[in-house]
Amino acid sequence: MQRGESLRIGTELVDVATGSQLWGAQYDRRPGDIFAIQDEISTEISGILRLKLTRTEKKAANQAPNG
């Protein structure tokens, strides 16, 4: 959502089997290069989620094919 000189981006990770939200956050940014904002937020999210993975989940994620 953009309001004036502010951009609010909502993110969430949902368990598709149950529909329940596993994680969510809001990011407030100034409008600019949307691709730079996307890269910044995706890096933040992956870092946060990586911390929450178990050792087995991390191993599986690292072995997943790049599609």
Image (cartoon, helix red, strand yellow):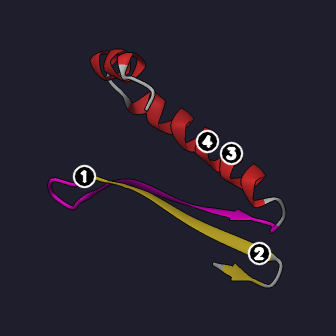
**Which numbered tag is attached to residue 39?**
3
Of residues 6 and 35, the one drawn nearer to the viewer in this rendering: 35
Mark toward the start of the polypeptide (2 vs 1):
2
Of residues 2 and 64, the one drawn nearer to the viewer in this rendering: 64
**Three-letter amino acid code at disc 1?**
Asp
Q: Report if the CB atoms under discs 4 and 2 are less than 8 Å apart.
A: no
Q: Residue at x 23, y 59 (%)?
A: 20
User: Which residue lies under the disc numbered 1?
Assistant: 15
Of residues 24 and 36, the one drawn nearer to the viewer in this rendering: 36
Mark toward the start of the polypeptide (3 vs 4):
3
Which portion, as a residue range, is magenta?
Answer: 15-31
User: Which residue lies under the disc numbered 4?
Assistant: 44
User: Which residue lies under the disc numbered 2?
Assistant: 6
Q: Residue at x 21, y 61 (%)?
A: 19
Q: Examine the rendered structure and indicate whether residue 52 appears above or below residue 40.
A: above
Q: Report if the CB atoms under discs 2 and 1 are less than 8 Å apart.
A: no
**Three-letter amino acid code at disc 2?**
Ser
The percent coordinates of residue 9 (x first, y second) are 60, 66
Question: Dividing the picture into quarters, in which one does residue 56 lie?
Answer: top left
**Secondary element type, mark 3:** helix
Pointer 1: residues within 10 angstroms few (<14), some, or many (20+)? few
Q: Report if the CB atoms under discs 1 and 4 are less than 8 Å apart.
A: no
Which dot, 3 or 4, sits closer to the camera?
3
